[in-house]
């Protein structure tokens, strides 16, 4: 069976240096990688002028809607009563994107209709992970 992929463009705000820029971010989920979600950013927002995709755990997104969550490169936390902040840490610095929490909840509910939490198949994801480790050996 082919993986099911969901995409949801949503408005967001890039917050940097006390300024906010409107940006459309596409939220993506695929049943082929059921533990992950992706945020796709347009090329104009990146330092090198190329589209950027950040991939992280779907469970991290869920947790970060209610309480600060994350370590490493992605941190998610409530940002006031109606917004959620997603911070991306890289060698170039930190970027913070503010989303309407309702949009993120809507996206998560859609992903749950494709793959319920706790019912993710680990076989294909584990096989891909092991294959990538062996390729690097």
Image: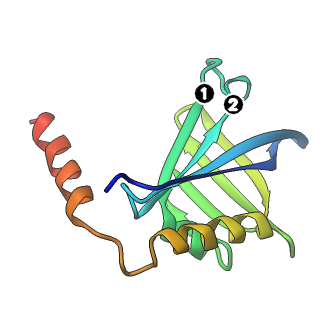
Q: CA distance from mark 1 to mark 2?
A: 5 Å
- Residue carrying label 2: 42
Instruction: Give residue 56's position: percent from left, percent from top.
Output: 48, 55
Residue 95 location, quadrant: top right
92 over 95 or under it: above or below: above
Proximity of marks 1 and 2: CB atoms separated by less than 8 Å: yes
Residue located 62% across and 37% down the image: 93
Residue located 15% across and 34% down the image: 136
Marker disc for residue 51: 1
Q: Secondary structure at mark 2?
A: loop
Instruction: Give residue 90's position: percent from left, percent from top.
Output: 54, 39
Q: Secondary structure at mark 1?
A: loop
Instruction: Give residue 110's position: percent from left, percent from top.
Output: 61, 68
26 over 84 or under it: above or below: above
Indicate left or right for 122 with 101 as reference. left
Indicate left or right for 105 with 21 as reference. left
Residue 119 location, quadrant: bottom left
Q: How many marks?
A: 2
For the N terminus, give its image quadrant.
bottom left
Marker disc for residue 131: none
For the C terminus, give its image quadrant.
top left
Residue located 53% across and 74% down the image: 112
How many C-alpha atoms fall within 10 Å of the one at disc 2: few (<14), some, or many (≥20)? some
According to the image, what is the colour scheme of the structure? rainbow
């Amino acid at each position: 069976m082919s993986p099911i992929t969901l995409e949801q463009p949503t408005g967001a705000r890039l917050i940097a240096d006390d300024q906010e820029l409107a940006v459309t971010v596409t939220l993506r989920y695929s049943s082929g990688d059921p533990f992950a979600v992706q945020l796709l950013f347009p090329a104009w927002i990146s330092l090198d002028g190329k589209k950027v995709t950040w991939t992280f755990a779907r469970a991290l997104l869920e947790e970060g809607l209610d309480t600060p969550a994350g370590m490493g490169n992605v941190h998610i936390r409530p940002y006031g009563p109606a917004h959620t902040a997603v911070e991306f840490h890289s060698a170039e610095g930190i970027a913070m994107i503010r989303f309407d929490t309702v949009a993120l909840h809507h996206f998560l509910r859609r992903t749950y209709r494709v793959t319920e939490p706790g019912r993710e198949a680990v076989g294909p994801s584990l096989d891909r992970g092991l294959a990538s480790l062996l390729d690097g050996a």
